[in-house]
Image (cartoon, grey):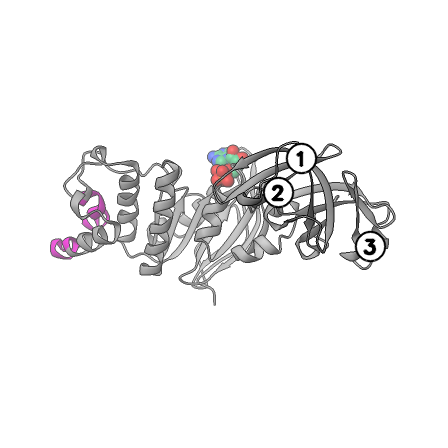
Amino acid sequence: MAYLTLKNINKIYPNGYHAVHNFNLEIEKGEFVVFVGPSGCGKSTTLRMIAGLEDISNGDFLINGKRANEMGPREREVAMVFQSYALYPQMTVYDNIAFGLTLQGVDEEVIEKRVQKTAKILGLTDYLDRLPRALSGGQRQRVAIGRAIIRKVGIFLMDEPLSNLDAKQRVTMRYEIAQIHRETGATTIYVTHDQTEAMTLADRIVVMKDGYVQQIGTPYELYYKPANVFVAGFIGEPPMNFVRGTVKNGCIALGDNALDLSRKLKDIARYEGKELVLGFRPEAIALGAQDGYVVNCRVELTEMLGDNTNVYVTSKEQQAILKVDSHDTPETDADITFTIPLESVYLFDAETENVIA
Ligand code: ADP
């Protein structure tokens, strides 16, 4: 039996807005699950329904197989970390971390031990006497995490916990959150709009859009086997290139190039005259003419990122981004050839946007 079960969960706000549609998910104990999607897609609403901070309009939420829709947040044994940290400004780091235990009337000595242990995990030992205002953003977020993990609850919920940090701090905290999860083994549900955070932290990712789940899978599955155009374009940086076109004589046009789709899909004949979307990832190409779809194009711009370079190319108004080894960066305005290996080509139905090959 799964630890947490969400069965056909829906959220309709009092103003009639249907924010979450038929959300289904089973979460195992100890799993790290990330809800990802653009702003407004219903991630926080779903998390808040799990936390007990928001009513579930319909559907069932089960903890250990027991219906939990009507349980209060305390009974659910959840701890939540918010984007805003929500620290008590007049309390020291020690008191902020200890707060939940103090409220529960836990013995002072036990509290002391647990605060010290938590502070050690989070690298806050030297800051216990400070007030939050004397801490950096990253340190404040650590205190907020400490306050949550010290309670040893079953479910750890995090809503965009890194969004107030700068890019460097985010990378460090991401690593620390992964370490904390490894050490505590707590079942974690983490909300973010950042696909890199989702990919790096998650055991499983739930991709959402407009209140609907688009796909649930491991980072590997979402990257290599996207279910539709949305997931394919959302996961991966720079995003997947898409070429929309009508199938003519079994081919789709990419600029000046006719790509023979029968090499990818045996029964391409049934799509003759229909519109398809062909996708390929910027990093999945090889420069030069090799085995696969060979494409001729012109280099518009290059962006050096270190070991690799983004190359913006066009072919007859159609644009694509290629990610190449910086040592192989072509000149701007050069005419170049690249190859998309067949196994790196995705085909989507243009109408449903679902993957077909
Ligand atoms: P996300 O976390 O993915 O950014 P939210 O779950 O916060 O999205 O919101 C999902 C949708 O529900 C948004 O369109 C938002 O405007 C709407 N929404 C959120 N809270 C309320 C509310 N209290 N009343 C009405 N609509 C709301």
Instruction: Specify few, some or many for label 3: CA neighbours under 10 Å numbering under 14, 14-19, or 20 or more.
Output: some
Would residue 290 appear left or right of 124 to someone viewing this image?
right
Cα gap from disc 3 to disc 2, whole angstroms: 27 Å
In the image shown, does 286 or 206 lie closer to the viewer?
A: 286
Q: Amino acid at mark 1?
A: Ala
Would residue 146 appear left or right of 342 to someone viewing this image?
left
- The reply to whether callout 1 and callout 2 are in contact (CB within 8 Å) is no
Q: Amino acid at mark 3?
A: Ile
> Which residue is tagged 1?
334
Question: Which stretch is magenta?
Answer: 94-112
Most distant residue in the bottom direction: 1
Q: Earlier in the sequence, mark 3 or mark 1?
A: 3
Q: Earlier in the sequence, mark 1 or mark 2?
A: 2
Secondary structure category for the residue under label 3: helix
Q: Quadrant of the C terminus?
A: bottom right
Secondary structure category for the residue under label 1: loop
Number of the label disc, if any, that sits on residue 322: 2
- Residue 225: x and y in percent read 62, 56
Secondary structure category for the residue under label 2: strand
> Which residue is tagged 3?
268
